[in-house]
Image (cartoon, rainbow, N blue to C red):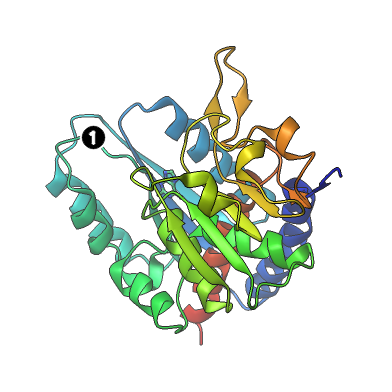
Amino acid sequence: MTAKIINGKDIAAKKKIEIAQEVKQLKAKGVTPGLAVILVGNNHASRTYVTNKQKTCEELGMYSILIEMPEETTEEELLTKIKGLNGDTKIHGILVQLPLPKQIDEKKVIEAIAPEKDVDGFHPINIGRMLTGQNAFLPCTPYGIMVLLEESGISLSGKHAVVVGRSNIVGKPVGQLLLNHNATVTYCHSKTKDLPFHTKQADILIAAVGIPNFITAEHVKEGAVVIDVGINRNEEGKLCGDVAFNEVSEIAGFITPVPKGVGPMTITMLMYNTVQSAKQSIE
Ligand code: GUN
């Protein structure tokens, strides 16, 4: 069996057309959705992500600003900047690129963002709303995964989803969203004993561990849906996921590649959330 490839780039392109249409409609009403991205310090990967976010805003006709702050920025300086953006009516979404330099408390920063502008979906209020099934900004990568599953016609109700990884950004929230869609959810992590025993039971397997080629054929049930959230570099410096793609695609029913899998969906859902925020600002 050879798995069907879930092409995140194509699905993202389709979603972006819909989002651009919404941007147009909002502009006709006098509102241009605006995103502020704050980049603190010199993290190379962060700079690449931020540049891509800016480019996508432009492509969709949105307004965006990039605020660059030096590595030695104090927590207070960053909090003051966020307060200013909370009150800026041209800005509907605020994203502080993580990780932050060590002198800054990430939790304090996330809590300083007005929940109605928290398009990353990281604020405890949005997390709590998501947990209780209320209207909330959903974190972009987990949300993107849900869209990939939906667009691929994969039903979730009663399915066993196994999430490998328990980060606040991906693992924990994606499990919650799967649960909200009536999947039976198992979380696995670095302390899990006999990982293949658990992952072999998965109808839907989410790999979000950040270790190249960690999930191999021995972890996967025949016909399973395998979602690879990893963005790693292998020994040759080539981009690769958490899943050993070649061997797992022989067994899985569906699989996301890296690149062109989950990655393009993250930025797309950020744009989607920003547009929803702009819409809500005039409701
Ligand atoms: N760093 C890695 N992923 C993300 C993300 O989704 N949002 C933010 N703000 N920082 C990140």
Residue marked by disc 1: 101
Q: Local crowd at mark 1 within 10 Å, few (<14), some, or many (≥20)?
A: some
Q: Residue at x 55, y 44 (%)?
A: 54
Q: Is residue 238 left or right of residue 211?
A: right
Asked if the beta carbon under badge 1 is closer than 8 A to the nearest atom of ligand 1, the reply is no
Q: Is residue 253 left or right of residue 205?
A: right
Q: Nearer the viewer, residue 265 or 210?
A: 210
Asked if one can make out residue 180 in the rendered structure from this viewpoint, the answer is yes
Give the mark count. 1
Q: Nearer the viewer, residue 182 or 91?
A: 182
Q: Residue at x 72, y 72 (%)?
A: 155
State the SS at label 1.
Answer: loop
- The vertical placement of 127 against 38, above or below, is below
Q: Nearer the viewer, residue 86 or 173?
A: 173
Where residue 260 appears, x then y in whole percent? 71, 40
- The vertical placement of 169 against 214, above or below, is below
Asked if one can make out residue 91 in the rendered structure from this viewpoint, the answer is no
- Residue with the most extreme right position: 1
Q: Is residue 241 left or right of residue 173?
A: right
Where residue 167 appears, x then y in whole percent? 38, 51
Q: Residue at x 50, y 60 (%)?
A: 34
